[in-house]
Amino acid sequence: MEVVIALLLLCFLLVIGVPVPFSFFGSALYLIFAGDYAPSFLLPYGHSQMTNIVLLAIPLFIIAGGIMEKGGIAKRLVDLVELFVGRVKGGLGSATILSSAVFGSITGSAAATLSSIGSIMFPRLEKAGYPLGYSAALVANSSVLGMLIPPSSIMILYAWLGNQSVLASFLATLVPGIILITLLNVINFFMMKKNPAVETSVKMDPAAFVRTFGKRTYAASFALTLPLLVLGGIYGGIMTPTEAAGLAAFYALPLGFFVYKGLTWKKLKSVLVESATTTGVVMVMLFSVMILSRLYIMEDLPSQILNFLFAISENQLVLLLMINVFLIIIGMLMDDISGVLLATPILLPVVVGLGVDPIHFAAIIAVNLGMGNVTPPTAPLVYLSGRISKAPINQMLSPTLIMIIFGWIPTLIVTTLIPELSLYLPSLLLGYQP
């Protein structure tokens, strides 16, 4: 009974707005005193789990993403993508989606992708006649691609918490990410093709197009090399994810200072301070989550949840539906990192008991949390996009719901019901056996 109260206490603290690390600690403290557990046993356990070198990849990717965000990389990516799709009605919206996917693969962060791509695209979209509310909704939904296109910070955490392969977890979210990119592009073209206010870019003659293509490709090539180096190094067996994250941070420095010249010493200091703050918060959450998850396991919470679900229904589809709803609610209440820290230790043993492969669940959890981050009424990424663009929230709700209904929900359905979409690449490239 104590573990159920502790879980309800955690949910209550999150709902009333208590910071996530303190919510985790509050639930853990209740179990420690109610269950008469010795802190002298739990604290060393939490510390021992924090020494895993895989976790070093988190601050390194955060630093690399911050440098790339401040260094002017996003503008070059947008310019290159816009060259191909800008002359089509709705093409600038498509450029926003594709640029978010590419930039997200570099930063691994939805918030960093939103702030960087959004600051560049909002003026361009407004000038091209896109409704402000629609533009803000599009950028918010596109920014989540940073969680699905590898390398993804939340997949590193998922693999660490669930004792799974980082590389397989990266690959599991790639196909769902491509499906979402496709659906968002279809929605964008459908919604904008009949809007008379939307303009297209000026057409070029073939010679001018070739010259412009050469210039923009050269300008973006240094940035596009980064994900190739990182992913190629990881999947080629040359580097571990931690070493790849270090390479990304090291490579980003001369790129920001000398190639794109958007990075200054003042901006670098800001990046390091912000990265240190974010890393500190993440580490505190990790420490509290490890203690809390240990207590949940000792209290046999996963088995209790599994028994409760089986008491409702023994149909796997019904049970997965309930788990998906729970994950969406978590995504609505907290950011992606906090969501994966909470959901993984609780739900991974449950879904394994239901016969779901752990790598398949990596894709399910990523799509659910991403969808939760843009689902009203909380929708943290939608509100962030509204603040950056200065778009009224009521103008953002309708296009956001359309993207959820026709983009996110179909992606979630096929990801959940067709395990092969998530398991094909890990099996093909890594020899993973479900």
Image (cartoon, rainbow, N blue to C red):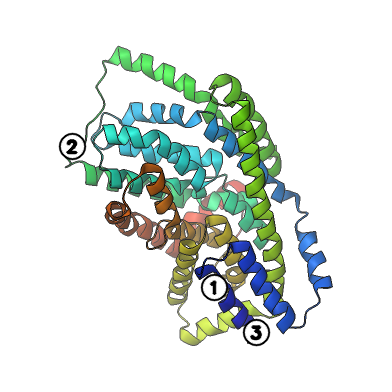
Q: Amino acid at mark 3?
A: Glu
Instruction: Give neighbour class at mark 3: few <14, some 14-19, many 20+ (Cα, 10 Å).
Output: few
Q: Residue at x 30, y 30 (%)?
A: 86
Check the image and report above or below for 38 versus 209: below
Residue located farthest toward the right when viewing the structure as drawn: 40
Horizontal side of residue 123 vs 2, given as left or right: left
Task: Kindly indicate whether the residue at mark 1 contacts the one at mark 2 (C-beta within 8 angstroms).
Answer: no
Q: Earlier in the sequence, mark 2 or mark 1?
A: 1
Q: Earlier in the sequence, mark 3 or mark 1?
A: 3
Q: Residue 250 location in percent, x, y?
A: 67, 31
Q: Amino acid at mark 2?
A: Ala
Q: Quadrant of the N terminus?
A: bottom right
Q: Quadrant of residue 230?
A: top right
Q: Is any part of residue 235 visible from this angle?
A: no
Q: Which residue is mark 1?
A: 11
Instruction: Give neighbour class at mark 1: few <14, some 14-19, many 20+ (Cα, 10 Å).
Output: some
Q: Which residue is mark 2?
A: 197
Q: Which residue is mark 3?
A: 2
